Image: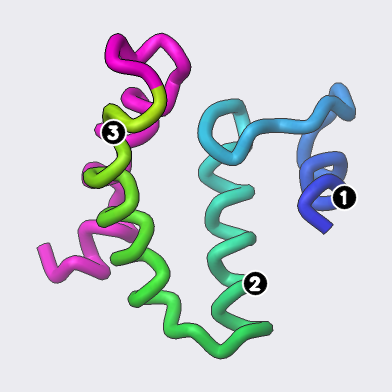
Amino acid sequence: MVAAHERERCPDKRPQSILVGTYALEITGALTQQLADELGYPTKMLLVCQGVYAVATAHALTPDGVDGQFAWCIAQPNRADILEALGA
């Protein structure tokens, strides 16, 4: 399902990463909403979980951050939807 969503959004038909890429925020938002709708999780709770995951895993994959995980993680607390979910 994600691949179909990605193809719809990406003019060059290449899959985009959920973490990085031109459509990363749109894909993440759509997946978050889909989980909320289909599984009954509150959107706010899912956004808080994304923020917590980002903080907890910032250095989990590589110590120097060259894999992109660190950049993604430190960007999450600045997202308006996550800030709102955290009550900031």
Secondary structure type for disc 2: helix
Is 72 magenta? The answer is yes
* Residue holding disc 2: 34
Disc 1 or 3, which lies upstream in sequence? 1
Relative to 11, 47 lies left or right: left
Residue 40 placement (x, y as % from top left) = 56, 89
Residue 4 placement (x, y as % from top left) = 87, 50
Relative to 87, 74 lies left or right: right
Residue 27 placement (x, y as % from top left) = 63, 49
Does the CB distance between marks 3 and 2 fall below 8 Å? no
* Residue holding disc 1: 4
Secondary structure type for disc 1: helix
Q: Which residues are magenta?
A: 62-88
Can you say whether 41 is above or below 6 in the image? Answer: below
Disc 1 or 2, which lies upstream in sequence? 1
| Residue type pointed to by label 2 | Gln
| Residue type pointed to by label 3 | Ala
- Measure the alpha-carbon separation of dots 1 and 3: 29 Å
- Toward the left, the furthest residue is 88
* Residue holding disc 3: 58
Residue 66, by quadrant, is: top left
State the residue at coordinates (80%, 51%).
5
Residue 88 placement (x, y as % from top left) = 11, 62
- Measure the alpha-carbon separation of dots 1 and 2: 14 Å
